[in-house]
Every structure is written in C-alpha cells, then in structure tokens.
Amino acid sequence: MKRDILYVLTTPEFFMEGPCGRVSHASGFVEGACENGARLTLLSGPGAEAFVDIAPIKNHRVRPGLLWWPSLLIKALGLACRHRVVVVRWRPILPFLLLPFLLLNRQIWFEVNALTGLDSSNPIVRALVRVSVWLSTHCFNVLTVSEVSLDRIAGVSTLRRLSHVMPNGFRPDELENFQVNRDANAPVSLVYFGIRQPYYEWDLLYRACERLSQDGVISGFHGFGYDEAGVPESVRPRGVFNRASLVRDLTEIVNPVLVVHSAGSDVARATSPVKLFEYAALALPVVCSSSMRRQAAALPAFRFYEPGDQTGFEAAVRDVAINYDDELSRADTSRRVAKERYTWPAVVGQWIRRVL
C-alpha cells in the first residue's frame, strides 16, 4: 500500500545550520502533514531528528559528500513510486534531473521559495534558470509560500499545471499564555522579535524611535533575537530568546506594540514571515510595512504604512498609541484568525485536502 507524501530536502546540510527559516518551514510541514493524518516519508541529509518529530514518520538519510546527488536521486527514484505525492525542495538543476521521475509519479510538487539565479549577472545562468522554471510550471506542480512568489514564477512562465500557496504556519504553544501589561497612564513600547533581517529598514526604525521617544509617544524599542552596539538611546537589543523567555519578558513590557518594518523590495514582498502569525497570536497591535499587506490581509490588528516612509511609520505608531484599547480589541480577532487559518495543521491541511 502506498504511503501519502515523500518529502525530499535537496541541500546536504539542510538541518546542520541550526534553527532558521527553512528548517522551521520543513519541520512545520512535517508536523502539519502528520496532524492531518498523512503518512509521510522524509528524505534528507543528517540532523533532522533535532528539529523534526521523527516518531510518526519514516526518515531516510543520505550522507553528504561527493556521492550526495547520485545517492539522493537513486533513493528518491525508489521511493517515488511508493508514494501518492512527492514534494521536492526546488533547485534550478532539479527539473532537468527529475523529468524521468514523471514516468513513475505524476504528482510531483516543487516547493519553490526563491528563484535562485534568475537575477544572475551571467546571461547563460539566467537562461538556464528560465528553462528550469518553464519545466517546473509545465511538467510539475508548484508550491510557494506567498502570492507574490507565485506571481514572480508566473511572470517567467505560464503555470500549466497545479499551483498552491502555502504560507509559513506557526505554533501557538507558549504564545497563547501571554497577557498584556496594560497601563493607561504610560506610553507604548515598540517590540520586534526574530532574526535581524537585512531586508528590513533598521535605520528608518531607529530614527523613528528617537523622534517618538523624544515626543513621549514610546518608552523605547525592544529588539529580541539579536545584539547590536552603537544603537540610539531609545533602542534596546535584547539578544537571543526562546518562546518561554519571550513571553516572560514581553509580560514585563508596558503597552507593547509589535513592528514589522520590512523594505519594499521584491525579496521582502515574496516572503511569508512566521512572525506575522506569531504576532497575531499574541493579540497585540502591530504596525506593519505594506510590503506585507497581502500576507497579513486577513489580520485586522495590523496597521500598515508605506515602506521607506518614516513619517507614515511614526503616524501609525501615534495612532495606535492614542487608540490602544480599541487596537487590543481588534488584536483579539487577529489571534482567532491566526489560530484558525495559519497554524501548521491548518495551512498544510488546506493543501492535503486538495491533493490526497
């Protein structure tokens, strides 16, 4: 009897860099599939057991080294015919290599997070990537994390087969225990948590924090997840965190307002940050760059401003500070929407109901 899903991760050191976006996505996909009753097989390099609950799945490991690609392809070939659906992490070379696999299984999906090489300065590389995208859209099915990412693929080649947008999901767990520290007589505090992403507008944020702090609108800015020297007086990097420590520290911050200060670049618009839904799960007001408007459109507690517009950012913060209690009421709705639509079982379940 065939198993349901074969999930192939095509980077040898996929799990070896520790916790990061791609690892969170892969472990979330596995978790969501299992929660929906799918029988899943994982084919990857070593290290999966540190991030994935391997008890309910079959885990096949391939040793990194010179024989990585032959070993991976041979194992995948043997497993493809024994599964109803195959999901493969896309790399430009793979559509060329996996064409013969279609003789064994027509339900092969490429998980495309970025079109690597499409913007290369080498015209030969750009041409090969375009051919790869054409093969992906005409011979295989396409799975992406955002509508913007899917639009970019469609801009290169018409989507001839199935496509599906599966945003990054999240795990509510400790976040549901958070209770806001509300003080009607105190200013708000801006908060960010996550990696210090290069496609976020940090200079804009820091300049705005200085002005808002001087005007008494905010008590300061707390940045969880990174350390940084030489920052303005109103900015307080808080270093590394885990879920439990984050909830504990957030409880001590008075009138918190979360920020998503992403730039207006194609990279920023094509992402699906887990923090959008983690922010929503905390039931707090959010000031967010409109580069994330499509990803966060269903979340009513998100107040948008145009990327690069410091005045617009400051105005959004001032408005939230004045109407903080009303914003908290809207944030309760955001929490409910996030738990219904954007947990990993929810986002993976939508795709599974379509393909299995």
Image (cartoon, rainbow, N blue to C red):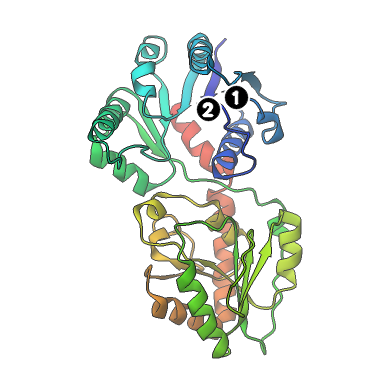
Q: What residue type is labelled 2?
A: Leu
Name the residue at 64% across, 21% down.
59
Residue 179's x, y, as percent?
72, 68
Residue 174's x, y, as percent?
72, 55
124 w.r.t. 223: above or below: above
Q: Residue 9 carries which label?
A: 2
Crowd class of label 2 (few under 14; some 14 to 19; many from 20; radius 10 Å): many
In the figure, is residue 151 to the left or right of 256? left
50 w.r.t. 276: above or below: above
Name the residue at 61% across, 79% down.
234
- Label 1 sits on residue: 45
Q: Are marks 2 and 1 in contact (CB under 8 Å)?
A: yes
Q: What residue type is labelled 1?
A: Gly
Q: Quadrant of residue 233?
A: bottom right
347 w.r.t. 174: above or below: above
Callout count: 2
For the N terminus, which image quadrant? top right
Q: Which of marks 2 and 1 is nearer the N terminus?
A: 2
Indicate which label's residue lies in the foreground, 2 or 1: 1
In the figure, is residue 330 to the left or right of 181? left
Residue 300's x, y, as percent?
48, 66
Q: Is mark 2 on a helix, strand or loop?
A: loop
Name the residue at 61% across, 38% down.
17
Crowd class of label 1 (few under 14; some 14 to 19; many from 20; radius 10 Å): many
Name the residue at 75% across, 59% down.
245
Residue 330's x, y, as percent?
54, 70
- Viewer-closest of 329 and 119: 119
In the figure, is residue 102 to the left or right of 67? left
Q: Which mark is residue 122?
A: none
- Viewer-closest of 97 and 182: 97
- Viewer-closest of 83 and 97: 97
Q: Quadrant of residue 254?
A: bottom right
